[in-house]
Image (cartoon, rainbow, N blue to C red):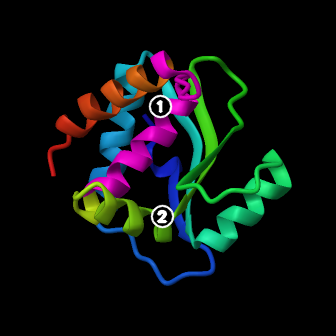
Amino acid sequence: MALKDISFFSEDIDFILKDKTKIRNWIGETIKSEGFKRVGELTFVFCSDDYLLDINKKYLNHDTYTDIVTFDSSEDEDVISGDIFISIDRIRENSAKFAVTERDELHRVIIHGVLHLCGYYDKKKEDKQLMTSKENEYLEKRSF
């Protein structure tokens, strides 16, 4: 896996992701476990609620706050590529709402975006149950 192709950026907020190398390895292992050969370009952008709301409106015609928006740019079926936008405001609010640490909520949302790129959905009840199960599976496999 070309883990150097997994990038992390902040847009319109001051946020620095901790454990970048460990997170890259964890994402790579997840993608490999899901049967993909490699990571193409995978970009994570951490941003505010308002920034992500603008993206949600502009590209998806959704006028709602969300914790994540994932854009798949994969060209080969065995290579994962895309852009994942994550609202740190939502992460903080949801961590309090669900009584989990911000770190754990952030990791859940990161792996949620990766799983979307691996072909999982979460609109139907059954799909959401499978997605949550997969999130839990990969969260348990973290070694950091």
Give the residue furthest to the bottom. 14
Identify which residue is drawn at 47% across, 68% down.
88
Identify which residue is drawn at 62% across, 60% down.
65
* Residue 86 percent coordinates (x, y): 53, 59
Give amino acid for label 2.
Arg
Residue carrying label 2: 90
Q: Is residue 96 above or below residue 81?
A: below
Give the residue furthest to the left. 143
Q: Is residue 1 above or below residue 101?
A: above
Q: Earlier in the sequence, mark 1 or mark 2?
A: 2
Q: Residues within 10 Å of mark 2 (few under 14, many from 20)?
A: many
Give amino acid for label 1.
Leu
* Residue 58 percent coordinates (x, y): 84, 56
Asked whether residue 121 is drawn in magenta, I would say: yes
Residue carrying label 1: 115
- Magenta segment range? 104-126
Pick the quarter of the image with the N terminus.
top left
Asked if residue 110 lies left or right of residue 39, the reply is left
